[in-house]
Image (cartoon, grey):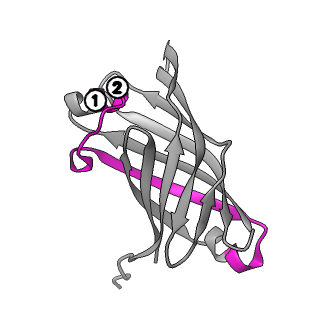
Amino acid sequence: MTLPAPTLTHVFDARIVVADPVEVGVTTAGSRRVIAIQGGTVTGPGLTGRVMPGGADYQTIAGDGLTRLHARYVIEAEGGALVYVENTGLRFGPPEALERLRRGEPVDPGLIYFRTAPRFETASPHLAWMQTSLFLATGARAPDHVSLSVYRVG
């Protein structure tokens, strides 16, 4: 028996405005940094709203440049429902491109592998479907924001 291959359905795009990174320093786990989330927008066929200020992206960067991302923030959907987001992922690419990203310089997103697996929690019955599916996202880092395209895995 062959099972069907998963499909991807576009849910929304997010533009998340971020502050300058706080460099904690090199620890036994790698280089640690925290990036405050200042706000943003969410638009798409499955969710529209705004990213609320107050979240953060917690990063660990290994010696080879592999960045492990763990962001936590809240989306206020159109109509006022709140959606808690916990988004984990990886970012990796050529050393020179990663160094330009760390310095806050623009980098061609095609050079960087940036993928995440967001999870959602909400008290909204209308958005409860977001809690019973898996999601994948592609990302791009700009000097002042992160862009994400989020897809439901079917």
- Report the Cα–Cα distance between label 1 and label 2: 5 Å
What is the span of residues highlighted in magenta in the rendered image?
99-128
Q: Residue at x 34, y 25 (%)?
A: 103
Specify the quadrant of the image occupied by residue 128.
bottom right
In this figure, which residue is indicated by the disc labeled 1? 100
Name the residue at the right extreme.
123
Mark 2 residue element: loop
Horizontally, residue 26 falls left or right of residue 140, namely: right
Task: Report the amino acid beneath label 1.
Answer: Arg
Return the x and y of residue 25 as percentages of the image width and height.
49, 14
Query: Callout 2 environment at 10 Å: few (<14), some (14 to 19), or many (20+)?
Result: few
Name the residue at the bottom extreme.
1
In this figure, which residue is indicated by the disc labeled 2? 103
Q: Is residue 134 above or below residue 4?
A: above
Specify the quadrant of the image occupied by residue 111.
top left
Specify the quadrant of the image occupied by residue 127.
bottom right
The answer to the question of whether label 1 and label 2 lie on touching residues, with beta carbons closer than 8 A, is: yes
Report the front residue among 114 and 45.
45
Q: Residue at x 62, y 46 (%)?
A: 72
Q: Residue at x 65, y 68 (%)?
A: 131
Report the front residue among 78 and 61.
78
Return the x and y of residue 141 as percentages of the image width and height.
38, 44
Task: Report the amino acid beneath label 2.
Answer: Arg
117 is within the stretch colored magenta: yes
Disc assigned to residue 91: none
